[in-house]
């Protein structure tokens, strides 16, 4: 069973994903703003991860929401948008750059720095 703080984090993530998707659709990348989560302990990240892994959303929406959570908990990470070229079949992907990530097969096109908390 999830702790109450994890449930609050999950609700925030659900709302943040929905709003981020709407912002991206209406205003593009420059108009996407992810609202800060409520003051919750870092351990409530379990709730955020439960939502981002289960709710239908794009990799960019997930990366932006995770970035906001991490920034508000003292961890800065850039969102990276990368592609795999036509020789391997074109694919694009976005992810949150963290020290524990292995090197990606995607070629970096754009890096979105972490916002200030």
Image: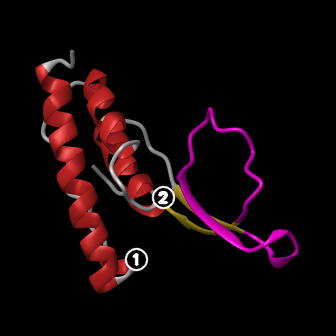
Task: Find disc 2 in the rendering and name its residue.
Answer: 59
From this view, report whether residue 57 is shown above or below residue 71: below
The answer to whether 18 appears left or right of 50 in the picture is left
From this view, report whether residue 29 is shown above or below residue 101: below
Q: CA distance from mark 1 to mark 2?
A: 13 Å
- Of circles 1 and 2, which is in front? 2
Q: Position of residue 106 (x, y in %)?
A: 73, 60
Residue 38, quarter of the rendered image: top left
Q: Position of residue 49 (x, y in %)?
A: 36, 36
Along the line of sight, the residue nearer the viewer: 116 or 82 = 82
Secondary structure of residue under mark 2: helix
Please tell me which residue is depicted at 36% across the width and 56% down the height of the picture: 56
Please tell me which residue is depicted at 25% across the width and 73% down the height of the picture: 22
Task: Find disc 1 in the rendering and name its residue.
Answer: 29
Q: Alpha-carbon neighbours of circle 1 within 10 Å: few (<14), some, or many (≥20)?
A: few
The answer to whether 38 appears left or right of 69 in the picture is left
- Residue 63 is labelled as none
Q: Position of residue 52 (x, y in %)?
A: 36, 45
Q: Alpha-carbon neighbours of circle 2 within 10 Å: few (<14), some, or many (≥20)?
A: some
Secondary structure of residue under mark 1: helix
From this view, report whether residue 70 is shown above or below residue 20: above
How many labels, in total?
2
Q: Position of residue 34 (x, y in %)?
A: 26, 60
Q: Is residue 38 magenta?
A: no
- In the rendered structure, which segment of residues is drawn in magenta? 84-107
Residue 29, quarter of the rendered image: bottom left
> Which corner quadrant holds the N terminus?
top left
Whichever of labels 1 and 2 marks the residue nearer the N terminus, that label is 1
């Amino acid at each position: 069973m999830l702790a109450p703080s994890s449930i609050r984090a999950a609700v925030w993530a659900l709302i943040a994903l929905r709003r981020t998707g709407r912002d991206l659709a209406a205003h593009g990348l420059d108009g996407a703003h992810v609202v800060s989560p409520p003051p919750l302990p870092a351990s409530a990240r379990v709730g955020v991860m439960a939502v981002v892994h289960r709710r239908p959303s794009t990799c960019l929406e997930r990366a932006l929401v995770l970035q906001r959570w991490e920034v508000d908990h003292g961890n800065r990470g850039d969102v990276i948008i990368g592609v795999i070229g036509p020789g391997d079949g074109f694919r694009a992907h976005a992810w949150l750059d963290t020290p524990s990530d292995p090197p990606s097969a995607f070629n970096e096109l754009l890096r979105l720095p972490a916002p200030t908390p």
